[in-house]
Amino acid sequence: MQNIVHQLKYKGNREIGIYLGYLFGLSLVKDKDFETVDIILPIPLHAKKLKKRGYNQSEYIAKGIAKALSKSLNTSLLIRVIENPTQTKKSRYARWENAADIFQLTAPEKLTNKHILLVDDVITTGATMESAAQQFTPLKDTKISIACLGFVAG
């Protein structure tokens, strides 16, 4: 799995993301908890990183999941406002510090009373996903679910 995610994230193989997301989505279709998902949001990259890489790997995974679930995907409601350094070589605590307050909602009123599925490629400590999910806590009657292709134990 590590090699596949590496191909997606660093080698530009976007089709792998869509395909894996679709397969993942087919398994989620069978779970009642995901029937009520209203919108799928990929964890965003900062604009500078997106420009450098050319694409957001989590968006391609989310596209596959959205297709399988027949749900809408949105890439503009959750944005990354702080360009934090890569997490790959950081300790667990440093990852949490590095991910604090890096996201913002652009139109929170569109997410009130919604079930949101946040999608990322890999979760290591959960710091990035938690930072993103915290943006939704002020919203009334909003439910957050998460989906990722892999977890890194550590």
Image (cartoon, rainbow, N blue to C red):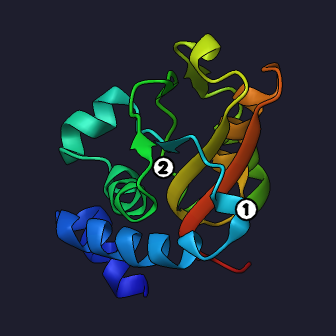
Is 5 or 64 nearer to us in this picture?
64
Q: Which residue is mark 1?
A: 33
Q: Amino acid at mark 2?
A: Thr
Q: Residue at x 41, y 34 (%)?
A: 74
* Vertical position of residue 149 compared to residue 80: above or below: below
Task: Give the quarter of the figure containing the N terminus.
Answer: bottom left
> Mark 1, residues whose alpha carbon is within 10 Å: few (<14), some, or many (≥20)?
few
Question: Horizontal and vertical percent for residue 146?
Answer: 65, 56
Question: Horizontal and vertical percent for residue 82?
Answer: 52, 24
> Mark 2, residues whose alpha carbon is within 10 Å: few (<14), some, or many (≥20)?
few
* Vertical position of residue 63 compared to residue 149: above or below: above
Question: Horizontal and vertical percent for residue 52?
Answer: 21, 40
Q: Are marks 1 and 2 in contact (CB under 8 Å)?
A: no
* Vertical position of residue 13 compared to residue 34: above or below: below
Is 24 or 120 nearer to us in this picture?
24
Q: Residue at x 42, y 84 (%)?
A: 2
Q: Is residue 121 left or right of residue 14?
A: right
Q: Nearer the observer, disc 1 or disc 2? A: 1
Q: Which residue is mark 2?
A: 86
Number of the label disc, if any, that sits on residue 123: none
Q: Amino acid at mark 1?
A: Asp
Is 59 or 81 nearer to us in this picture?
59
